[in-house]
Amino acid sequence: MIDWDRVASLRAEIGEDDFLEVAEMFLEEADDVIERLLAGRPGSSLAADLHFLKGSALNLGFADLAGLCSEGEKLADAGAPVDVPRVIRCYASSRLAFEAASRSVTSAA
């Protein structure tokens, strides 16, 4: 679900404070996209929203979400149906796992 090696690498590359800021920014922006998807009104296009989520997910280590978004982006570009509820569920479970692990790291520091 989460590529914890990527998370650790990003944290080491940019430092704890910047990592927390990047993670918070990603989660806020992803929440906005997820809200649009839940409402059935993707931004400029479903493919563009999935592309955004994919890039952000890869950066922050949300590996399963990135894979689903990549698959969905290709389907959307081809005019095929996308399992948007599955993407939303994956984001929600990934976010919960990430936040739980982040709380553990923060409380251990």
Image: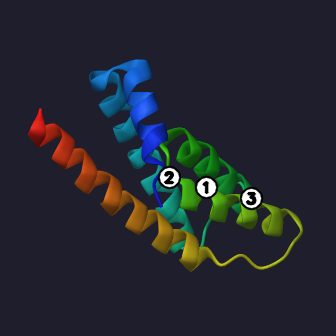
Instruction: From the image, state whether disc 1 or disc 3 is nearer to you.
Output: 1
Q: Position of residue 36 (x, y in %)?
A: 53, 64
Q: Residue at x 81, y 62 (%)?
A: 74
- Amino acid at circle 3: Ala
- Amino acid at circle 1: Ala
Foreground of the two, 15 or 75: 15
Is the Cβ of the residue at disc 1 closer than 8 Å to that at disc 3?
A: no
Label 3 sits on residue: 47
- Earlier-in-chain disc, 1 versus 3: 3
Is the Cβ of the residue at disc 2 closer than 8 Å to that at disc 1?
A: yes
Q: Secondary structure at mark 3?
A: helix
Q: Residue at x 46, y 41 (%)?
A: 5
For residue 66, the mark is 1
How far separated are the C-alphas under marks 1 and 3? Answer: 13 Å
Q: Position of residue 104 (x, y in %)?
A: 17, 47
Neighbours of disc 3 within 10 Å: few (<14), some (14-19), many (20+): many
Q: Residue at x 39, y 68 (%)?
A: 93
Neighbours of disc 2 within 10 Å: few (<14), some (14-19), many (20+): many
How far separated are the C-alphas under marks 3 and 2? Answer: 18 Å
Label 2 sits on residue: 62
- Earlier-in-chain disc, 3 versus 2: 3
